[in-house]
Amino acid sequence: MKKLVLFIAVGSIIFAGGNAFAQTATQTVTFQVTAIDEISVSGNPGALIVNSATAGSQPTAATDATTSYSITTNGSSKKITGDIDSAMPANTTLAVTLTAPTGGSSAGQVTLTASAADLVTGISTLAESGITISYNFSATTAAGVVASDTRTATLTLTDS
Amino acid sequence: MRIYISSDNGHRDRERRQPGRAALLLSILVAFCLHISSFPLYADSLTVSGDPGILVINSVTAGSQPTSVTDATTTYSVVTTPAQMRITGELNSSMPPNVNLRITLQAPAGGTSSGSVQLTTTAKDLITGMVHHTNQGGLSITYEFSATVGAGVISSSSRTVTLTLTTLN
C-alpha cells in the first residue's frame, strides 16, 4: 500500500510539471531607408520693377523677400545651387540670397546665370522649413526700358 | 510411498513482484487521469499568416521628417481556453538609432488591444483581457516603420518579431 501511494505521488509530480504554457508565433520584418533629399519653395516672388532712381545715380534696384524654401535631407555634405533658365537682358542683373539652414553656410548674394552657382553649402541631416529667399533685380541706365519678362530660377539640393 | 515436497517460494516471489508492477501502472494511470482532467477539449494556439512586406522609407515632404510607412497585409489567429490570457510582442534585437517599429494587433472578441505599441527587445502587452474561450482568425496585424533624418541611409535589414500567447499574470 505504501508503494502504491508513493508511485501515485511520483506519477502526479511528473505529469503536473507538464502544465506550464506559452504559445509563440514569429514574423520577420524587413525595413530600409533610402537616401532622401528634398527641397521646395513657398511660391513665386512678386514682380521686380525698377522704376525709380536718385538723380545722378543708377536706377534703384528692386528686392523681394516674400518667399521661402523648405529642405529635408538624411545625407551629409549637401549644398544648394541656383541658376536661371536663360540669360538676363543686357545690363540687368538678378541676384538671390538664401538664408542658411542650421549648420549650413550661405554664400550671400549671388548673381544668377544659366550656370549653377553655390548658394548654400555644408548641409547635413536636417529638416527645416520657411527659410528666407531674397531676390534683387538691378539695371543700369543702359538697359533702357525692359518690358515685363520672366525667368525660371531653379534651386537644386545636391552633393557637395 | 511417494513423498511430495513442494516449495511455494517462487510463487510467493512472483506475488511480491506483481503488486509492485501493478501499483506502478495504476499510479501512472491515476496521475494521467488527474492531469488530463484539467485539459480543455482544445489546445491554446497562436499563429500568423506570414511575414509583412518590406517597409521602405523613401519619401518626404520638404521641411518635414521622412514619411513613415505601414503594412497591414498579415493576420493572426488565436485559440484560448477560458483563462486570463494576453499576447505580448518583442524584437530579437534593437532597431537602429532614430528609427522605430510599431505594431498594432486587432483585438479578438472579448480582448483589448493596446493600440500602436513600439517594439523593443522587452516583451510588451499587445492584447490583454482575453478571459473567455477565444477561437478567432484573420485578425489584422499592422506594422508602422518610421525614421528621422538622423537615421541616415539604412540598407535592407530585418528583425524577428515574436508574438507570445501567455497567461495574464
Image: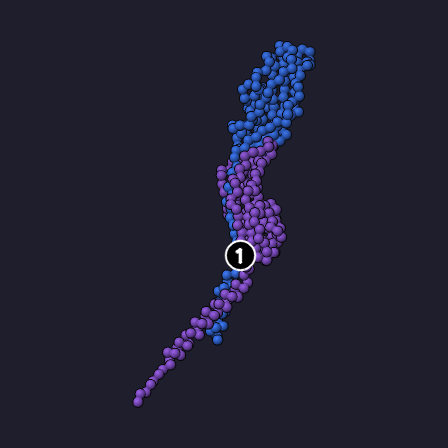
Q: Residue at x 56, y 26 (%)?
A: A156
Please provide percent x and percent y for residue A150.
Answer: 62, 17
Q: Residue B148: which quarter of the image?
A: top right
Residue at the far front in the pictured view: B1
Please provide percent x and percent y for residue B59.
Answer: 56, 33
Please provide percent x and percent y for residue B155.
Answer: 49, 37
Q: Residue at x 57, y 51 (%)?
A: B136
Residue at the far left in the pictured view: B1
Q: Is residue A149 above or below residue B85?
A: above
Chain A tint in image: blue
Q: Which residue is mark 1?
A: B43
Task: Please tell me how many numbered marks the rendered image carries.
Answer: 1
The amino acid at mark 1 is: Ala
Q: Give the chain letter at badge 1.
A: B
Q: Name the one closer to the observer, A62 or A53.
A: A62
Residues packed near mark 1 inside 10 Å, few (<14), some (14 to 19) or many (20 plus):
few
Horizontally, is B4 left or right of B121 in the view? Answer: left
Q: Residue at x 57, y 24 (%)?
A: A155
Q: Name the one closer to the observer, B93 or A80.
A: B93
Q: Which chain did the renderer colour purple? A: B
Q: Is residue A31 visible?
A: no
Q: Is residue A4 visible?
A: yes
Figure coloring: by chain
Horizontally, is B96 left or right of B114 in the view? Answer: left
Q: Name the one closer to the observer, A134 or B112.
A: B112
Please provide percent x and percent y for residue A104.
Answer: 57, 30
Horizontally, is B59 left or right of B2 in the view? Answer: right
Q: Is residue A107 above or below residue B20?
A: above
